[in-house]
Amino acid sequence: MKASVASNLAVISFHLLIIGFSSISVYVNASRNHIVGGDRGWRFPSKSSYNIWDLHRSFAAGDTLCLYNELRQSMSSGSDKIRLKKRINYFICSLPGHCAAGMKMKVQVKKKKSH
């Protein structure tokens, strides 16, 4: 009887261990896409600062910023994606006057993956 209980506990412990490792793996490998500017996208003139937009989000290395615009300048597709790197990432619009008018953004990347 005691061997049966010990065997059941070993099986349960093993399954809990597998579930725990699976959860960690999903957490570590998860990366997110962030659409810059939300539904409005990366457009000029911006109704608010993109630096305010990014304050309410958590970014991690490996996450992707999706820049959607109609201008198709600098980045050729108008539907561009940029994989974030560690530390600080800077983004600006290169058209005259746009950067000064708020089309710029600094993204601070956290060490841990977002989820």
Image (cartoon, grey):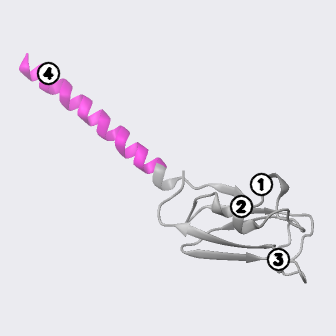
Circles 1 and 4: CB atoms closer than 8 Å: no
Query: Label 1, on which residue?
Result: 38
- Residue type marked 1: Gly
- The answer to the question of whether label 3 and label 4 lie on touching residues, with beta carbons closer than 8 A, is no
Q: Is residue 24 left or right of residue 10?
A: right
Query: Element type at marker 1?
Result: helix
Image mark for residue 88: none
Q: Is residue 17 above or below residue 68?
A: above
Give the spatial CA distance, label 3 vs label 4: 66 Å
> What residue is pinned by disc 3?
93
Q: Which contiguous range is marked in magenta?
A: 1-26
The mark that comes first in sequence, 4 or 2, is 4
Mark 2 is on which residue type? Answer: Trp
Residue density around tag 2, few if under 14, some if 14–19, many if 20 or more, within 10 Å: few
Mark 1 and 2 residues: CB-CB less than 8 Å, in contact? yes
Q: Earlier in the sequence, mark 1 or mark 4?
A: 4
Q: Nearer the viewer, residue 89 or 1?
A: 89
Viewer-side residue, 13 vs 106: 106
Label 4 secondary element:
helix
Residue 67, x across and y down, in percent: 78, 64
Instruction: Tell which tag, 1 or 4, sits nearer the viewer.
Output: 1
- Residue 72: name its quadrant: bottom right
- Where does label 2 land, which residue? 53
Mark 2 or 3: the one toward you = 2
Q: Earlier in the sequence, mark 2 or mark 3?
A: 2
